[in-house]
Amino acid sequence: MSKLRVGSLFSGYGGLDLAVLEFLDAEMAWHCEWEDAPSKILEKHFPGVPNYRDVTKVDFSSIEQVDVLTGGFPCQDLSLAGKRAGLQEGTRSGLWLEFAKAIEIIRPRLVVIENVRGLLTAKADNGMEYSTEILDELGARPVFTAIQAVLGSLDDLGYDAKWTGIRASDTGAAHNRFRMFIIAFPKG
């Protein structure tokens, strides 16, 4: 039986990828990391593995289709340390839409997503249509969190998901850096 093949979006230095490869005894197929410094690290750790760099320019139907898709889409607009612009089109964190597009085209058997604690509380556009006339009268707009938007997108794409938060110290690190992890898989 051949090994599972992994594609990585917003790869950074590849930490999430290394964990997934180890856990699943899988092989790296490709990366998408646009920054130079982490790209050099990826090249060293994964020689010969293509880096498609800019996720917004990748035609996911024309690259190697993978069994597992990993990634930690940009957190700057979700992080408590950032401006909290939220998960919206036009923000860096809004690049989640590119991740969702890749899932829709590739249809992986497993998706592994990592992000910051702010995913739980940052606001998000959800793409739902609602009656602005009624809401204007009430002076309200529906408020959705980033995790609700991500889970809603996955559901729309036909994926179920499980999620949890883990502190780095829970894994033996000397700090408490908290991260959210979402594991998604096709329904049924």
Image (cartoon, rainbow, N blue to C red):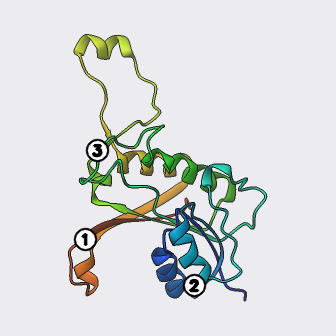
Which residue type does callout 1 highlight?
Arg
Dot 3 surroundings within 10 Å: few (below 14), some, or many (20 or more)?
few
The x, y position of residue 67, in whole percent, is: 65, 71
> Residue 83 bears which disc, if any?
3
Q: Nearer the viewer, mark 1 or mark 2?
A: 2
The x, y position of residue 113, in whole percent, is: 46, 64
Q: Nearer the viewer, mark 3 or mark 1?
A: 3
Instruction: Tell me the residue at 24%/81% (across/down).
Output: 170
Q: CA distance from mark 3 to mark 1?
A: 19 Å
The x, y position of residue 56, in whole percent, is: 62, 49
Is the residue 136 above or below the residue 40 in the image?
above
At mark 3, the secondary structure is loop
Q: Which quarter of the figure is the C terminus placed in?
A: bottom right
Dot 1 surroundings within 10 Å: few (below 14), some, or many (20 or more)?
few
Residue lying at the far right of the rendered structure? 62
Q: Is residue 175 left or right of residue 57?
A: left
Instruction: Tell me the residue at 61%/55% (across/down).
Output: 55
Q: CA distance from mark 1 to mark 2?
A: 24 Å
Q: Which sits in the foreground, 29 or 134?
A: 29
Say whether disc 1 or disc 2 marks the residue closer to the N-terminus: 2
Which residue type does callout 2 highlight?
His
Which residue is labeled 1 in the image?
Answer: 177
Q: Is residue 177 left or right of residue 72?
A: left
Which residue type does callout 3 highlight?
Lys
Q: Is residue 75 left or right of residue 70?
A: left
Q: Is residue 39 left or right of residue 82?
A: right
At mark 1, the secondary structure is loop
Say whether disc 3 or disc 1 marks the residue closer to the N-terminus: 3
Dot 2 surroundings within 10 Å: few (below 14), some, or many (20 or more)?
few
Is the residue 21 above or below the residue 120 in the image?
below
Residue 179 lies in quadrant: bottom left
> Residue 45 bears which disc, if any?
2
